[in-house]
Image: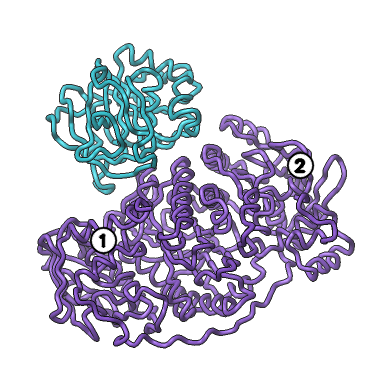
Chain colours: A cyan, B purple
């Protein structure tokens, strides 16, 4: 059986496509890049990752321009069919700007960029994204963003991950990551693709990529 | 640029050229230069571009060695790290622009050094910064500090290169002249290294990236080669404006073109813009270049030919391309949403020619611009040698614990987390040791090797004794790298000094270079790239002589790297190294005074060998350089990083406070499993001591210096050390 094909999106200004592709590979999937101007996902795509970065240099609003590109039409159709989508950092912002996830990402309460290793608490064990971990279990995954404070109605989404301890960015309800009510579209500000190897300090990000491929 | 020129002042003087230099230009050319030609000479003969004061001194640096693939002279130096790969790196200053407009000044400093790395064909994998500002009780210094850090973050985060280390210092001597030095490290297959040398008559000259505007006109001469003064706000138009999104596209495009073999040569446009880039490429290749200025894509109308030639608009590269590859180059650029424009060709004349509206406005042999600058002998008036500190004149603290906390709260000693949390330290998923330790450690992508990188400088010692300060600047940087277990293999330097024509600055420059050269030779780390920034001086006085040294070390097995954090309860704590602590020129003394014993490069080299062997054999759980704040601060930092207390006992030496807080020598606080102490000791030699001084554990950190005991709860040390800089910024 061939490996599960995962489309890794690239917009001008995307930065984390290589590490996201490596994480897909490390989980046993087959990463294929898809570009902003493509009208369709690569043939045989089973899941989509929207990696982090500064698509279009954050011009207008983070994620705003990327959300209106042709490839996002294809991602919408994929999600409507129940296909899995994982948006990381700028990918989360793009998903919110696209309407695939509720709410918006506002500038951090400190108004500055923050890069920090964070403990994330599993807030909902009922989605596929945390691999059966119990509520309250903790994942160590770094975050790094300027516009990471999620603002929205938690009732419109499933809050999958919350920052443990103090709220680092002013997010409503300490939200770090949410999925849609259907559970197939997941967005989070922390970077699971940078928590894949013991050498880099944590492997707790593997669970999200495993979920993407399951 | 002529708006401010009074009618009776000759053009060359308003451009920063001396009368003698202007006369020399007429003599070389055999005629009066055109206005655009004079503008080009003024930039290329500025200190910033020509190093006319420093170049004769720099020849003392060791620049060769078995690992050197490309030494100084190109956009960046390169060293062999195995697997057919080279690590490419350079440090560069952007001091004057940052003093005038800190956000854009610092941001474009990052952009500029990154383009130096991509010009060699390398993929950038790490950034570092060395920053110096006035004391934090000054509102202006707080503003410069905040905005420079924001600018570095804004640019660096957006281009996707992890920031893995550096240093920040505060001293009133940098109140007017802040220092912003940026270092970039890249990796490239050795057979794909690009030179800037133009080759092949008839090949096309291609301008890639941003359009050209009026920003940054005269930056190298007006700003960077003169002292700052009260009219600095007027110089704001000389500061460039950065666009990191375009830089990211430019990085991707240059790497793609290099991988596809489309480029004959590549050069970034930095100080003096097209003039500098084209003349360097022509001189290096021994050819001429003809530029049609009408084909340069412009951002604004009505630019004069001289302005097009020296504009420092950012995010531009100049390439030499074979005619047959032009379609591929233009097509690839279009796919990256960038311009690539054929603006001229390689000629066999050795001259730089520029056409404007069909007329020749410039014809200068390129060597006149790059090689014929009249060098200046700097005056070398020695400053008197300082006296050693009389210890009895230093009041002994009643409470060593309180003195310890006060030292941890000194912004020069305190945690710089407020700074590096604003930088993406992780992008690329190769960062193994993040900022805050002795050196950043980054895996070389696609391999099991890693590099350790750091920037450091001993400016107080360089002021007091410039030779020793040069030695110490090298050794402190190399020791930081060695503490990760890496072998220091090569170095880069950024020499930040005041006006070399005044006082003892010229002597300090010459002496510190001599010290650096001797130390680099002793530890076997040649210089492969560097930068000089002079005139860091204002009416209120000169900066300290600040020779910032960047050292790159290699770990053949990435998994053997060592961090600074104590790891396990009951581990033995070792004091490893050579030399005795002194209060002279220490942070504990709190002022630049005294005369510490000279640093010992040979003993330090032996220390590095010991640390590298211990890393390979996986004997050490942690290692941390004893630097500012002395042994007590190093122990506290390892304890805070590990979240675990410690207890150590050392001899009092001359006095307990000196034993705890004194600096000097080459000393490291390490920890290991108790059963490995004997193995570590057995490996020591060549004047390196290994002494077991205590154990990891408990909730307090306890230091016993000859019976005088300081005991402070770990959380108090951490609170003070981590809170100092944010509090200094918030209190205002």
Q: In screen coordinates, is B262 left or right of A189?
A: right
Can you see residue B449?
A: no
Q: Nearer the viewer, residue B535 or B622?
A: B535
SS at badge 1 = loop
Q: Residue at x 76, y 59 (%)?
A: B14
Q: CA distance from mark 2 to mark 1?
A: 54 Å
Q: Nearer the viewer, residue B680 or A127?
A: A127
Residue that lies at the very extreme toward the right in this rendered image? B31
* Pointer 1 residue: B564
Q: Residue at x 62, y 62 (%)?
A: B229
Q: Between tags 2 and 1, which lies in front? A: 2
Residue that lies at the very extreme toward the front in this rendered image? B732
Figure check: B387 above or below B150? below
SS at badge 2 = loop
Residue A15 screen position, x and y as percent: 43, 37
Figure check: B460 above or below B200? below
Figure check: B338 above or below A156? below
Q: Nearer the viewer, residue A97 or B499?
A: B499
Residue B264 screen position, x and y as percent: 64, 47
Q: In screen coordinates, is A13 left or right of A179?
A: right
**Number of the label disc, if any, that sits on residue B303:** 2
Where residue B283 sits, quadrant-wise, is bottom right
Figure check: B182 above or below B703? above
Residue A19 screen position, x and y as percent: 36, 38
Specify few, some or many for label 1: CA neighbours under 10 Å numbering under 14, 14-19, or 20 or more: many
Q: Could you tell me which chain the residue with mark 1 belongs to?
A: B
Q: Residue at x 68, y 59 (%)?
A: B221
Q: In screen coordinates, is A203 left or right of B67?
A: left
> Which of the two labelled residues, at mark 2 and mark 1, occupies the earlier sequence position?
2
Can you see residue B9?
A: yes
């Amino acid at each position: 059986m061939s490996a599960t094909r995962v489309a890794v999106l690239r917009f001008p200004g995307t930065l984390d496509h290589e590490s996201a592709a490596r994480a897909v590979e490390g989980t046993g999937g087959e990463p294929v890049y898809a570009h902003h101007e493509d009208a369709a996902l690569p043939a045989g795509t089973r899941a989509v990752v929207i990696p982090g970065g500064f698509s279009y240099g954050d011009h207008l609003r983070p994620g705003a321009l990327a959300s209106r590109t042709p490839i996002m039409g294809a991602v919408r159709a994929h999600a409507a069919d129940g296909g899995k989508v994982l948006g990381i950092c700028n990918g989360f912002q793009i998903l919110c700007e696209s309407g695939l996830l509720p709410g918006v990402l506002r500038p951090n309460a400190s108004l500055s960029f923050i890069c920090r290793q964070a403990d994330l608490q599993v807030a909902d064990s009922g989605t596929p994204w945390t691999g059966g971990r119990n509520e309250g279990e903790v994942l160590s995954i770094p975050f790094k963003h300027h516009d990471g404070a999620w603002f929205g109605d938690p009732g419109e989404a499933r809050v999958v991950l919350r920052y443990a301890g103090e709220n680092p960015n002013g997010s409503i309800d300490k939200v770090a990551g949410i999925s849609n009510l259907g559970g197939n579209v997941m967005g989070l500000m922390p970077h699971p693709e940078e928590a894949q190897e013991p050498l880099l300090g944590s492997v707790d990000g593997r669970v999200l990529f495993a979920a993407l491929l399951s | 640029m002529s708006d401010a020129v009074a009618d009776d002042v000759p053009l060359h003087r308003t451009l920063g050229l001396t009368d003698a230099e202007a006369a020399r230009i007429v003599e070389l050319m055999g005629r009066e230069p055109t206005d655009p030609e004079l503008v080009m000479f003024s930039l290329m003969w500025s200190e910033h571009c020509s190093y006319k004061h420093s170049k004769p001194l720099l020849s003392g640096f060791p620049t060769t060695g078995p690992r050197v693939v490309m030494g100084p002279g190109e956009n960046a130096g390169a060293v062999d790290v195995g697997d057919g790969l080279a690590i490419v790196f350079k440090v560069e200053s952007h001091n004057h622009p940052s003093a005038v407009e800190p956000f854009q000044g610092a941001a474009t400093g990052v952009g500029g050094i990154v383009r130096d790395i991509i010009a060699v064909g390398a993929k950038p994998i790490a950034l570092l910064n060395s920053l110096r500002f006035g004391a934090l009780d000054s509102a202006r210094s707080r503003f410069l500090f905040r905005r420079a850090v924001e600018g570095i973050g804004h640019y660096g985060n957006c281009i996707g290169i992890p920031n893995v280390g550096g240093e920040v210092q505060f001293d009133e001597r940098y109140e007017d002249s802040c220092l912003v030095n940026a270092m970039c490290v890249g990796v490239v297959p050795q057979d794909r290294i690009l030179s800037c040398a133009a080759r092949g008559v008839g090949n096309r000259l291609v301008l890639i990236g941003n359009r050209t505007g009026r920003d940054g006109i005269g930056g190298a001469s007006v700003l960077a080669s003169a002292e700052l003064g009260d009219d600095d706000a007027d110089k704001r138009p000389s500061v460039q404006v950065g666009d990191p999104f375009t830089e990211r596209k430019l990085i991707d495009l240059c790497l793609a073109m290099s991988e596809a073999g489309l480029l004959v040569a590549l050069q970034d446009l930095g100080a003096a813009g097209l003039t500098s880039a084209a003349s360097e490429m022509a001189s290096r290749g021994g050819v001429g270049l003809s530029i049609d200025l009408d084909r340069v894509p412009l951002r604004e109308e009505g630019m004069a030919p001289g302005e097009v030639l020296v504009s420092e608009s950012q995010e531009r590269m100049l390439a030499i391309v074979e005619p047959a590859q032009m379609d591929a180059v233009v097509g690839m650029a279009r796919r990256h949403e960038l311009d690539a424009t054929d603006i001229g060709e390689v000629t066999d004349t050795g001259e730089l020619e520029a056409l404007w509206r069909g007329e020749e406005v410039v014809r200068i042999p390129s060597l006149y611009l790059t090689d014929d600058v009249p060098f200046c002998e700097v005056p070398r008036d020695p400053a008197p040698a300082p006296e050693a500190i009389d210890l009895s004149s230093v009041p002994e603290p009643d409470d060593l614990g309180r003195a310890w906390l006060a030292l941890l709260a000194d912004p020069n000693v305190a945690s710089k987390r407020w700074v590096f949390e604003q930088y993406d330290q992780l992008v690329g998923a190769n960062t193994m040791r993040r900022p805050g330790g002795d050196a950043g450690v980054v895996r070389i992508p696609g391999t099991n090797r890693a590099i350790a990188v750091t920037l450091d400088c001993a400016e107080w010692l360089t002021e007091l004794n410039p030779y020793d300060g040069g030695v110490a600047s090298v050794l402190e940087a190399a020791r930081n790298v060695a503490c990760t277990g890496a072998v220091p293999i090569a170095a880069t330097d950024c020499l930040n000094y005041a006006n070399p024509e005044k006082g003892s600055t010229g002597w300090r420059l010459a002496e510190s270079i001599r010290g650096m050269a001797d130390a680099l030779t002793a530890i076997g780390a040649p210089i492969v790239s560097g930068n000089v920034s002079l005139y860091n001086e204002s009416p209120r006085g000169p900066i300290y002589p600040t020779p910032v040294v960047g050292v790159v070390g290699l770990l053949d097995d990435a998994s053997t790297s060592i961090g600074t954090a104590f790891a396990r309860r009951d581990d033995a704590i070792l004091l490893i190294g050579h030399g005795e602590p002194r209060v002279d020129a220490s942070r504990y003394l709190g002022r630049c005074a005294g005369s510490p014993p000279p640093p010992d490069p040979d003993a330090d080299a032996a220390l590095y060998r010991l640390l590298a062997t211990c890393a390979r054999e996986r004997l050490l759980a942690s290692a941390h350089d004893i630097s500012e704040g002395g042994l007590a601060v190093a122990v506290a930092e390892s304890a805070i990083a590990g979240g675990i207390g410690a207890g150590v006992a050392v001899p009092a030496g001359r006095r307990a406070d000196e034993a705890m807080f004194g600096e000097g020598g080459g000393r490291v606080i390490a920890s290991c499993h108790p059963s490995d102490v004997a193995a570590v000791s057995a490996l020591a030699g060549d004047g390196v001591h290994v002494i077991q001084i205590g154990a990891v554990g408990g909730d307090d950190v306890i230091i016993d210096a000859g019976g005088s005991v300081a005991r402070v709860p770990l959380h108090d040390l951490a609170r003070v050390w981590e809170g100092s800089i944010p509090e200094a910024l918030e209190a205002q």
